[in-house]
């Protein structure tokens, strides 16, 4: 006589696996959402710190919108002119403040890195050159797991 699993035993094992999967899958997806929200907070904190350091080192002047990426990722002199290499002899001693502008980790503009002037423009970050503020370029309906707008982070 062959010894194996009966049909009832196999059905019970499949039901148990199904119940475990039903519990685990939603938790995994919530974990990915939370990770993206945490990445957004970390990216904003890093960029805000970089902007403030640029401001402090460049005579209380924020980087311009047109040169936002270069100002934060390259070396510069006191006037804010950017260069690829540091040169203490010519005063190119500031920066870089970031290795790269981080991509937006959430929303419809996810993956983009460009800074733009207004919410809704085609880019990742809304940058106000007069105040030195940066926020996520996400539509009003794009909210986190607590219903807080990403653009309010």
Image (cartoon, rainbow, N blue to C red):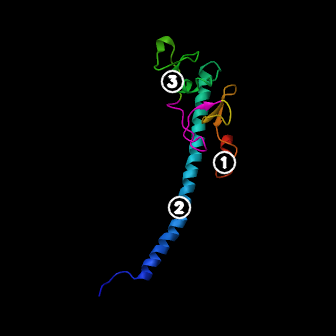
The tag on residue 79 is none
What residue is shown at x 70% (from left), y 44% (from top)? Answer: 140
Main SS class of the magenta portion in the image? loop
Please provide percent x and percent y for residue 28: 53, 57
- Which residue is most to the left? 1
Q: Which circle, 1 or 3, is nearer the viewer?
A: 1
Q: Which residue is mark 1?
A: 143
Question: Magenta stretch: residue 56 in it?
Answer: no
Quick one: 67 or 78, which is closer to the camera? 67
Q: Mark 1 or mark 3: name the one nearer the start of the chain.
A: 3
Note whether 76 is above or below 137 in the view shown: above
Q: Which residue is mark 3?
A: 74
Q: Which residues are magenta?
A: 98-116
Quick one: 41 or 124, which is closer to the camera? 124
Q: Mark 2 or mark 3: name the one nearer the start of the chain.
A: 2
Q: Residues within 10 Å of mark 1 (few under 14, many from 20)?
A: some
Q: Mark 2 or mark 1: name the one nearer the start of the chain.
A: 2
Question: Disc 2 and disc 1: Cα gap in Å?
Answer: 21 Å
Number of marks in the image?
Answer: 3
Question: Magenta stretch: residue 102 in it?
Answer: yes
Please provide percent x and percent y for residue 41: 60, 42
Question: Disc 2 and disc 3: Cα gap in Å?
Answer: 43 Å
- Helix, strand or loop at mark 1: loop
Is disc 2 in contact with disc 1, using a CB cutoff of under 8 Å? Answer: no
- Which quadrant, please, contains the C terminus? top right
Note whether 57 is above or below 48 in the view shown: above
Q: Which circle, 2 or 3, is nearer the viewer?
A: 2
Please provide percent x and percent y for residue 30: 57, 55
Q: Which residue is mark 2?
A: 25
């Amino acid at each position: 006589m062959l010894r194996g699993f009966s049909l009832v035993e196999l059905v019970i094992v499949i039901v148990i696996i199904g119940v475990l999967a039903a519990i685990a899958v939603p938790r995994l997806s919530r974990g990915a959402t939370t990770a993206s929200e945490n990445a957004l907070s970390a990216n904003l904190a890093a960029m805000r710190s970089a902007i403030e350091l640029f401001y402090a080192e460049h005579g209380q002047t924020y980087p311009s919108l047109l040169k936002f990426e270069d100002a934060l990722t390259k070396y510069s002199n006191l006037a804010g002119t950017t260069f690829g290499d540091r040169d203490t002899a010519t005063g190119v001693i500031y920066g870089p403040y970031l290795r790269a502008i981080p991509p937006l980790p959430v929303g419809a503009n996810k993956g983009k890195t460009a800074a733009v002037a207004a919410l809704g423009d085609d880019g990742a970050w809304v940058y106000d050159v007069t105040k030195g503020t940066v926020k996520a370029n996400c539509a009003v309906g794009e909210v986190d797991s607590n219903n807080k707008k990403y653009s309010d982070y």
